[in-house]
Image (cartoon, grey):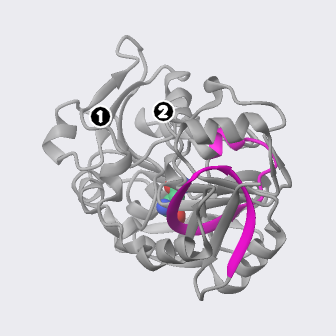
Amino acid sequence: MTPAYVALEGGHVIEGRGRAPGTARGELVFTTAYTGYEESLTDPSYEEQVLTFSYPLIGNYGVREERFESDRVHPRAVLARELTEDVAEWLESEGVPAIDHLDTREVVTDIRDGGAMKCGIAVGEDVTEADALAELEECKAMSDHTEIGAQVSVDETVVHGADNDGETVALVDCGAKGSIVDSLLERDATVHVFPHDATPADVEAVDPDVLFISNGPGDPANYEEAIALVEAFVEDTPVAGICLGQQIVAEALGGTTEKMTFGHRGVNQPVLDLESGRVVMTTQNHGYTVADPGEHLEVTQINVNDDTPEGIDGIEYDVITRQYHPEANPGPEDTLDFFDDVLAMADGQSQRAVPADD
Ligand SMILES: NC(=O)CC[C@H](N)C(=O)O
């Protein structure tokens, strides 16, 4: 059995079975998702994290590229009770250390008690506990990854669906999942995918019908350029956002964000729509949340478990955002109509509670 160690903040070391070799460090988080491991492992929002699957068997339907959300695995390392050979081989080929045969209940309990925490990972024939502890020593807090947007964003603008007849979307790529682009293309939009640090002039050049801020990893406060884009466009152009995008929009419009203890990661988070009273099941993956939406935004949907904001609308501006992942992949598709609402807003068809002055 290949030795494998996870060193947790505070120095507690958990031993497991090595499935893919290497050393790594990152913020230790867990997801309760029971399907969708390919989508989760390729979701750029997991950059600089070590992902623990609490579901006990991961990989039971193989690994298929058409389910990937980006072109690589983003977590720095993967922990599970049992990984199939397919997944272990895939992670090894990606150079991502993987460990199984550990007590994931213990890991999840530690995270629930101590919050998402730094960890060090060491897997390989010759590694020792000291190697995992050395990685832990080097691990940075998530908010100190100030250049994280550059690690996951496109370098140059990419256009999808240039011949489509629908709305023109300026999607700011802070680590966008492929399904967000697909959901817009399926609705006939033309999607210009911009780097995370695009300038207002770059975006203005395509005359967008909506500015759309994507999901992405890390602390929203580290996305200064995207925050500035929202500030620059919100008075004249509709704005949408998913997950990190909701947090960036709040930061831009006078709201605040904060780090949660261990966040929401899974495919069955219940969300209440305050107007309709309807509850939907949602896919989530976030560690920060909007703490105060500020005076320009109102909360329209909340998490049933802890009342955190899940949907936000502009009061005097055309803005709609979601904290969860309406594009699913993985997870239930109850919330795909968010994309219809965004494109209706882009087309000037939105039904906001407070109409704009013009
Ligand atoms: N999926 C996301 O966009 C994650 C947003 C942000 N990085 C958070 O952890 O809260």
Residue toward you, 35 or 345 = 35
Give amino acid for label 2: Asp
Q: Give the residue furthest to the bottom.
A: 10
Q: Give the residue furthest to the front.
A: 126
Residue 18: horizontal and vertical position, in percent? 70, 55
Residue toward you, 66 or 281 = 66
Q: Say few, some or many: other residues with alpha carbon within 10 Å of mark 2 (under 14 / 14 to 19 / 20 or more).
A: few
Looking at the image, tell me whether mark 2 or mark 1 is earlier in sequence order: 2
- The answer to which quarter of the image holds residue 238 is top left
Residue 241: horizontal and vertical position, in percent? 46, 51
SS at circle 2: loop
Q: Which residues are magenta?
A: 13-40
Find out whether residue 107 is within the magenta segment. Answer: no
Give amino acid for label 1: Pro
Left or right of 244? Residue 123 is right
Residue 71 numbered mark, or none: 2
Q: State yes or no: Cβ of the residue under disc 1 lies below 8 Å from any atom of ligand 1.
A: no
Residue identified by numbered label 1: 208
Left or right of 315? Residue 156 is left
Q: Residue at x 42, y 32 (%)?
A: 347
Q: How many circles with numbers are drawn on the protein?
A: 2
Residue 72 numbered mark, or none: none
Residue 202: horizontal and vertical position, in percent? 17, 39
Q: Residue at x 58, y 65 (%)?
A: 121
- The answer to which quarter of the image holds residue 37 is top right
Q: Is residue 331 above or below residue 308?
A: above
Marks 2/1: CA distance? 27 Å
Q: Say few, some or many: other residues with alpha carbon within 10 Å of mark 1 (under 14 / 14 to 19 / 20 or more).
A: many
Find out whether residue 19 is within the magenta segment. Answer: yes
Q: Residue at x 53, y 27 (%)?
A: 182
